[in-house]
Every structure is written in structure tokens, then in C-alpha cells.
Amino acid sequence: MRAILWDMDGSLIDTEPLWEVATYDVSERLGRRLTPELRAKCIGNTLPDTIRICADHAGIEATEEVITRESEFMESRVAQLIAERGIEWRPGVRDIIEQAHEAGIPVVLVTNTRRRVADYCIDAMGRDAFADTVCGDEVPAGKPAPDPYLRGADIAGVDPADCLALEDSVTGVRSAIAAGCRVLWAPMPQAAPPADAIAEFAPPAEHLDGDLRGWSLDDLRAVHASLSQ
């Protein structure tokens, strides 16, 4: 393992509840509140894909105007929630990042969130936590396409196969695998993945039923090594 590529929302920090509020708000603005099952399908998606899910559920056409308007609303809503509530690191993450720095292993943040909102979170975490950052509006296609992770590996200067991606969503896992990365999949407790997805991804992904509390950099190295065999 020569680099760590780390998803942001739900992986580095617990912002998924904020996106959940904003997503339900958008669905209600469009005329019909999402079901919990449809909301789960939005996790890790790009903003346009999330707006399309909301629009389809409401029975309206997801025109470019609708996507642009609702995306701007959602980003503003999340920024407001971040300002009001702050952000919270997921357990174990900061210790591993510090160990990676000491070992000279670059940590690149790779998110589907657009730069406008991601910067609020990155500033709150501290920009010196990362060698660099990749946002969803800075690549040709967002997750589940491989572009974000390919860009992250390129920034780190290593082959994707030498990277361990840390993800919480099915969408993100698909993206990292498509890029050729090894993946540690640690979903949020409230977002238990379907069993068929766990079977589909293993290997090159390992599913963690819990968080990274008590984990170390050596544990991540061991996961990468086992998935590389």
C-alpha cells in the first residue's frame, strides 16, 4: 500500500445526516418526499443523480433547469447545516491519518461532493490532513465512474492497485473498484449494505461491519495485502 484514497461524506466525517436532511428537503420541494429506501440509493451519488431520483419519485421531468436549481439549493442547505452543526470525524480516522503522515504515505481525499461545499468540510478538518483533494466537479464523471479515484491515484503518483480506497457507499465502492483500487468498505451504521453487494465486491473489497475505532495504519496495510493476493 503506497497511498490511501479516502472518501469524505460518511467515511472521513459523519456528514451523511446533513445530506439526508437536504435530500428529503429537495424531494419535498419537488412534490413528494422520498421513501427511506430511495434515500438510501442517493448515498454516494452525484448531485444530478440524486435530483433525478427525487424528480422520478415525484413524477416530474429532471430537466437541466431542475437539476441546476435543486443542486444549488441542496449545496446551500448542506453548507447551512455544516455552519449550524459543525462536522464530526468518524471514529479512528484521525489517528490513522496521523500515522500515515509519519510513515510518508499520502492521503488523498476523493469525494463526489462539488468543490463549493467540500471546501467547508476540508477547511473544518484541516487542509494539512491531506496530500491533496479531488472533488466531483473536477473530473469528467463522478462516482460510480472510476474518474475520481483514477485522479486520486494520479495525484498520489502511484498505480491504483497500490492504493487502498476507504468508502462507505455502494456507489463509491463501484468507483474505486472500476479504477483498479483495493477497497475497505466501512458503511455508516444506519446504512447497512445488501448481502448481494457484499458478495459482489469481495474481493477486491473487504467489508467492515463497524467503524475504524481501534484500527491502525498497519491494519490497513494488512487489508491491502490480503486483497492483492
Image (tube, grey):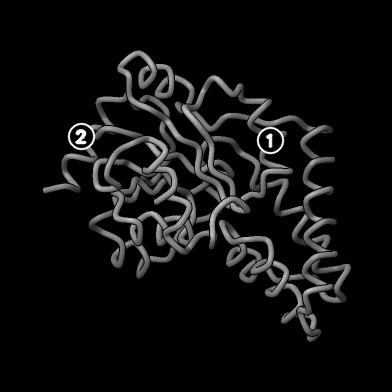
| Residue at position x 38%, y 54% in the image | 176
Vertical relation: 196 (above or below) 115: below
Q: Earlier in the sequence, mark 1 or mark 2?
A: 1
Task: Confirm or deny contact between disc 1 and disc 2 (CB under 8 A).
Answer: no
Position of 16 with respect to 67 (left or right) is left
Q: Secondary structure at mark 2?
A: helix
As shown in the figure, which amino acid type bears the numbered disc 2?
Ala
Residue at far top of view: 102
* Image spot of residue 97 (x, y percent): 43, 23
* Circle 2 residue: 222
Q: How many residues crowd around disc 2 within 10 Å: few (fewer than 14), some, or many (20 or more)?
A: few
* Image spot of residue 125 (x, y percent): 61, 25
| Residue at position x 32%, y 41% in the image | 164
Q: Secondary structure at mark 1?
A: helix
Quadrant (top left, top right, bottom left, bottom right) of the N terminus: top left
228 and 104: which is toward the camera? 104
